[in-house]
Image: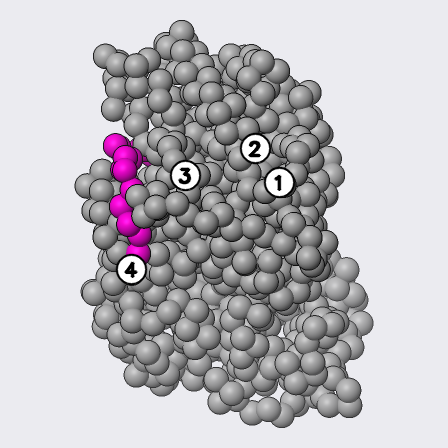
Amino acid sequence: MDRRDFMKTIGGAAAGAYVAGRGLPALAQQRGGGAGRGGRGGAAAAGPVERKRISIGGQRVTVIDVHAHCTVDGVAEVVKGTPFERQAGGRALDADRIALIDSEGIDIQALTINGYWWWEVQDRALAGRIVRAQNEGLARWVSDHKDRFVALSSVSLQFPDLAAEQLDYGVKQLGLRGATIGGHVNGDALSDPKFDPFWAKANELGVIVFMHPGGADNIVKDTAWKARGDIGNIIGNPLETTYFLTRLIFDGTFDKFPNLKVCGAHGGGYLPSYFQRTEVACDVRGNAMCANKKHPREYLRSNIMADTMVLTDEGLRHLVAEMGISQVVYGTDNPLNWPVPVEMIVNHSTLTNDQKVQILSGNLMKLLKITTPATA
Amino acid sequence: MPNRRDFVKAMALAAAATAGDRLAFAQGAPAKRREVFIGRKRIKVIDSHAHLNIAEVANVVKGTPFERQAVTTGDGIIGPARLAWMDRDGIDIAMLTQQGAFWYAVQDRGLARDIVKAQNEGTAAVVAKNPDRFIGMASMPLQFPDLAAEALEDGIKRLGFKGGGISAGWAGAKNLTDPEYDVFWSKVQELGAFMFMHPGGTNGNGDPHFGGKGALPNTIGNPLETTIFFSRLIYEGTLDKFPGVRICGAHGGGYLPSYLGRTDAQCRRQDDVCTGKKRPVEEYFKTQLMADCMVFREEGLRHLVAELGVGQVVYGTDMPFGWPVTPDFILNAKFLNDAQKEQILGGNLIKLLKLSPNTTA
């Protein structure tokens, strides 16, 4: 994703359906994670936005969004004068975000900082300072807007033991509700035992791990990616997630850490929607060497979760049928303009009211330990 | 390129799975031919996805760098065991495509032409022995678009084939949407040839990320290759340029039909990346792109049919590989009515390939 394209589209979007808000993102995040064109711009400058309140069957539902990108102030100062100086910008939080979630009927948003450029930092002390700045920035924003946001911890996963410490500190001291990660660390698969300290900590704390891909640049590097349709994102992102979740299954990571709840962005990529080949691979392929102890579907229905970004009524019906209702949670990709309005769930053609409430609210209230429902 | 070791191993596995049948056959016990009925109607079952190897190819590649790629033994060689297997499962007709794609790497035009000639004439000979049980599909040297067009025309006009089999390796291979392939696609369209696309290029073999557990070059690499191929056919405008082309993707068409929302949504939110195509993404799947039913579970099939329409889904088994997909997978699907079951098991292909609806047994 280059900056020129990004600015062009943001400009286009702002000039189109949305009135430009103040503070356009200064710099697109690199590596595709959370980057991308087609931001919503902002709505704040248009004046106060009426807050949309969602009810199902006459009952007010606390709508929680698991998939929301942001950056925080404070990181820029830490990386100043380092090779990572230009990475600190992005989707800074401000009044526009509140206007956006008001307008979309989102009561509580789980914020994550994505892109994972800081995983390339080889200086352990610097890596620690960057994540500290990210997590403290998140905690500050959340404490200023307690009823509207929670946040997940960034971690320095290139130093797995440090990542475990950061997650522990983030959850216990800063009130963060889990961790966010990419699909690989500089090309290394996260089922590699060297990452066990991180998984062990997430397992111990019982917190959600939200995984967001960045274009599968770990596994596809050739020119097939440079084509129309933005397929580096459209195929690359679900591919990275598919590969990531697949390895956690087949390499036995979920057996080692059975308490894990790993949520894959964008409907968990291809994996849940096309699970059948994965499911029979160990039986059919003589060279599969599977290390998993249980049938692959058991992980899909317990350890693996997915957001609702399959974007169609039939896609969501299928996702729920494959994973079980407890594994599917609402996610929007805010502030990007993917068409996943809350109405996709509220007006769904086959889900029951109870199921809709679980997806929009119940599953995440439990997992993110949100105890106060929306009253407004 | 195609990984022969992997292939041989899988063949051995498939052989083990059918050892019982083959033993019974060797002992002279005739396998009873299963006849599939829906209600009281005898249904013609057509397998769109069946592989073969032609032993004579070994003579052609002898003394060349491709000598070790020829397969001369195993379940890919069509013989009584294959018919016994089809009889047992209730498959009336198998559409035969070559397994693998090693000949795409041949740089010598003459050798490439000779290899596919041996494959195609060998296939025609197999069909000639049991013309009511097999349909031939042309093998083509896709690295030479003009030769591929020639081989397809020869296969259809001289050898009586109904279409051809293609692969679309994604690492370093040419893209079949490049304009140099217009000569090939225009021939496909002109002949009304049915294309069966089966991944089998490089699909991650040799990339350390696809090593390790779970047979990932197959489990992920195969549907990925098909996904990129279909995406490019749509986005680069190839399907608009050649609206008569019909392509069936193996293994449920890869990821794309099962995860279609993202593909279409991207064009709605960023139309500047979708300038090469003329229609909404789902329309290509309702018309030109098809998929076999190799999704193994009723819920997967239900989703596939919902996304593509029942007229775009065809029965396929991957024979002689031992994937769990007999006609009962379709017959037992609760969400399908009888007419829909018949369409998937054979009706769609009878119509498309203008086959006789009658069965011989």
What crowding class fits label 4: few (fewer than 14 Cα within 10 Å), some (14-19), or many (20 or more)?
few
> Could you say whether the residue bearing mark 3 is in a helix, strand or loop?
helix
Q: x and y percent of residue A228 in the render?
A: 28, 56
Extent of the magenta region = A17-32
* Residue carrying label 4: B271
Q: Which chain hosts label 4?
A: B
In the rendered view, tell whether residue A270 sits above or below residue A118: below
State which tag comes first along the sequence, 1 or 3. Answer: 3
State which tag comes first along the sequence, 2 or 1. Answer: 2
In the rendered view, tell whether residue B248 sits above or below residue A230: below
Q: x and y percent of residue A40 in the render?
A: 35, 47
Observer-nearest of B341 and A333:
A333
* Residue carrying label 3: A97
Cα separation between marks 2 and 1: 8 Å
* Residue carrying label 2: A147
**Residue A153 located within the stretch drawn in magenta:** no
